[in-house]
Image: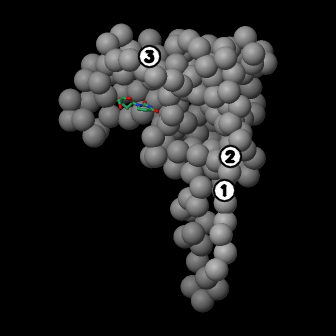
Amino acid sequence: MAHKNLSIRILEHDSVEQLNAGERALVDISRSMTEKAYAPYSNFYVGAAVLLENGEIVTGSNQENGAYPSGLCAERVAVFAASARFPGVPMKMIAISAKSACLSIDGPVSPCGACRQVMLEYEVLQSDPIKLLLSKESGKILVIEKVQDLLPLAFTGKDLKRNDHH
Ligand code: THU
């Protein structure tokens, strides 16, 4: 029997001022993207901005639907758009922010399980980490070094590899 401990490193900044210029710009864009959310049912407005290795920034916001499960989170809107527009171009960083007029948001928004899984797919594919910057409209920023940190023991496409007999 073996005990295995997993640990993750999270950097917590008090405000955007403590980030470097590139990180700060991306957080600012994700914050401004909350204004573009279509979230009439939850009133929870999320913005995401993906910085690609080629310097492009692809953005997204959550898009809800009257048939609730048909909507999509900001992260997946942004990441799918990035991969659709720039297939195979590695993703360096993703900033995510949330805002609400009527809900009290405690701290930086944390991506849902499905979005973690989707972001991990591209991280595994490119084999370089995608840094995550989590925030809300103001205040603290959490920096996570790689998506894998938020999804330990993940199922990935590698688990679907065929063996030699097929
Ligand atoms: N949402 C996101 O867009 N990203 C997150 O990280 C958390 C949740 C959206 C989905 C839904 O439109 C609303 O926020 C409430 O769950």
Which sits earlier in the primary sequence, circle 2 or circle 3? Answer: 2
Residue 107, percent across and down? Answer: 51, 23
Front: mark 2 or 3? 2
From where the camera sits, is residue 52 visible? no
Say which quadrant the C terminus sits in: bottom right
The label on residue 101 is none
- Would you call the spot at circle 1 few (<14 residues within 10 Å), some (14-19), or many (20 or more)? few
Residue 64, percent across and down? Answer: 31, 28
Q: Identify the residue at horizontal 67%, vertical 66% (top origin).
A: 4
Residue 74, percent across and down? Answer: 46, 29
Which sits earlier in the primary sequence, circle 3 or circle 1? Answer: 1
- SS state under label 1: loop
The label on residue 99 is 3
Amino acid type of the residue tagged 3 in the rendering: Lys
Q: CA distance from mark 3 to mark 1?
A: 31 Å
- Of residues 17 and 62, the one drawn nearer to the viewer in this rendering: 17
The label on residue 6 is 1
Q: Are marks 2 and 1 in contact (CB under 8 Å)?
A: yes
Amino acid type of the residue tagged 1 in the rendering: Leu
Q: Are marks 2 and 3 in contact (CB under 8 Å)?
A: no
Q: How is the image coloured?
A: one colour
Say which quadrant the N terminus sits in: bottom right
Counting every numbered tag in the picture gives 3
Q: Identify the residue at horizontal 75%, vertical 33% (top origin).
A: 53
Residue 46, percent across and down? Answer: 45, 23
- 118 w.r.t. 45: above or below: below
Residue at the spot of label 2: 8
Q: Is residue 59 left or right of residue 25?
A: left
Q: Identify the residue at horizontal 75%, vertical 30% (top origin).
A: 54
- SS state under label 3: strand
Q: Is residue 84 left or right of residue 89?
A: left
